[in-house]
Image (cartoon, rainbow, N blue to C red):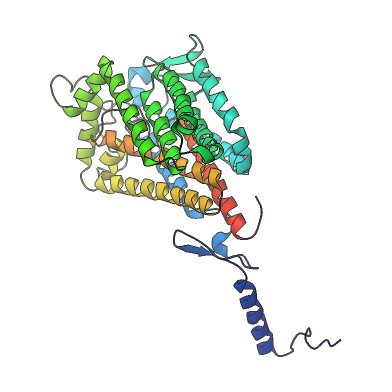
Amino acid sequence: MSNAATRTPSNPWQRLTQWLGSARSQAADVLPVRVGGTEYRQTTATPASVLGFDQALLWVVVALLSWGLVMVYSASIALPGNPRFSNYAPTHFLTRHAFYLVMGFVAALLAFQMPMRTWERLAPWLFGAALLMLVVVLVPGVGKVVNGARRWLALGPISFQPSELAKFAVLIYAADYMVRKMDVKERFFRAVLPMMGAVAVVGALLLAEPDMGAFMVITVIAMGILFLGGVNMRMMVVIGGALVSAFMMIIITSPWRRERIFAYLDPFSADHALGKGYQLSHSLIAIGRGEIFGVGLGASVEKLHWLPEAHTDFLMAVIGEEFGLVGVLTLIVLFFWLTRRIMQIGRQAIALDRVFPGLVAQGVAVWLGFQAFINMGVNLGALPTKGLTLPLMSFGGSAILMNLVALAVVLRVDYENKLLMRGGRV
C-alpha cells in the first residue's frame, strides 16, 4: 500500500488546488434550498448568512419598541394635569411602559428557548387556558371594569388582558389544528366548521366584555391560517360572507356601534364632533397640524387634554403631529417590512416541510399586520373608530407582552430553519 495518495503536498499551491477540488466535490453532492430568491447551500463551513436568527428583524422590532417608548412619554407627559390622573407623576406611564418592556423581553427570552414541537404539543392546553381566563374575567368582582368594559384581571400592581392571550392562543391552536386536519382540509364539516365553532365561542366571550376589536383580529388570524393551510377559496368565500353578515348584525343591533359608524362618516358634524366623532376629529386635526415634517418631538398640542387615549389607541395621531407625513410614512414602511419578513420566514419553514412552524409565523404576520392596519386606518380617518392599539408601540402591558412572545416564537422558527439548512436537527 502506497502513502502517496494520502500524503499532503508540500507545495502551498498544490495544497490550495487539492482543497478547492475537495470542496467542489463535496458541494456537488448537496442540494441547495432556494426560498424567496435566496439560496442556502449546506457546506462544511456554515455561511454567516445562516447563523443564528434574523438580526434585521430583531433590530426593526427594537427600533419600533424604542420609538414607542419615546412617544408614550411624549403623549402622556401632560396627563397629570387631567383630574382623572392628578395623582400620577409626569413619568408614570413612561416607567410603567418601560417595566412592561422588561417583562416582555424576559417572557420573549423564555419563549425563544422552547422548540416549536413543544409549542405544538401545548396548543390545546394554551387554548383551554385562554378560554378559562376569558370566562373568569367576566365574573363580577373578579374582572376589572374600565370605561364600562370588563376586560382586565388585576394581578397585584398590574392588570392583564386575557383577550391578548386569546389572540396568541388561537393562532397556535389554529396552526396545530390545520396540521392535524391536513388530510381532510377540503371537507367543510370535518375541517373548517369545528375551527369556526371554536372561534365563535371565543367571540361570544369577547363580545360579552365587550371587545369587538379583539374578536375581529382573532377572526382574521383564524381565517388567515385556514387559507394559508390550504382551505380552498370556495370555502373561504362562504366563511367570509358568514362573518361579514355576523358583524353587520352585531353593528345593526347595537345603537352605540351604529353611532360610531355615523360619526366616522361625518366626524365634524354638530351631532358627532362632541360625541362619538370627538376622538376621530381631533386625531385628524393632530395629523393635519403635522403637515410634512411635523411640529417637533414633544410639541404636540392635541395631546394636551384634547385627544383622549393619546398614549394608547391614538398614539399614531401624536406621531403624525410631531413627525408629520415623514414620520407616518416611516412607520408604515417599518410595519410593512416587518409583516413581509415574518411572512417570508413562514414560507421558508413550509418549504422545509415544517408546516406547523410555518403557519405559526404567517399567523403572527397576519396578526401584527392586520392590527397595525386597523389602528393606522382609524387614526387616519379611513376606518371607523375601534379600540385597537398600535402593536409594539402603544401603551399597554398585556399587548406588549404577547407581541414580544409572538415575535420570539417567529425568531425561533427562523433559528430552526437555519439550523436545518446547515445540517442540524430540531
Front in this rendered view, residue 309 or 265: 265
Tell me where residue 350 appears, x and y as whole percent. Answer: 52, 50
Based on the displayed image, in which of its 4 quarters is residue 47 positioned?
bottom right
Residue displayed at 76% across by 85% down: 8
Tell me if 369 is positioned left or right of 419 in this view: left
Residue displayed at 42% across by 19% down: 204
Above or below: residue 227 compared with residue 341:
above
Residue displayed at 57% across by 63% down: 48
Q: Is residue 395 visible?
A: no
Marks counted in the figure total: 0
Front in this rendered view, residue 252 or 228: 228
Tell me where residue 197 appears, x and y as whole percent. Answer: 46, 24
Residue displayed at 25% across by 15% down: 255
Above or below: residue 218 compared with residue 33:
above
Q: Quadrant of the N terminus?
A: bottom right
Tell me where residue 221 appears, x and y as whole percent. Answer: 43, 35
Q: Is residue 248 visible?
A: yes
Tell me if 347 is positioned left or right of 129 in this view: left
Front in this rendered view, residue 231 or 92: 231
Above or below: residue 346 compared with residue 32:
above
Residue at far top of view? 140
Residue at far left of view? 270
Tell me where residue 354 appears, x and y as whole percent. Answer: 56, 48
Based on the displayed image, in which of its 4 quarters is residue 44 positioned?
bottom right
Residue at far right of view? 1
Based on the displayed image, in which of its 4 quarters is residue 86 positioned?
top left
Tell me if 322 is positioned left or right of 130 in this view: left
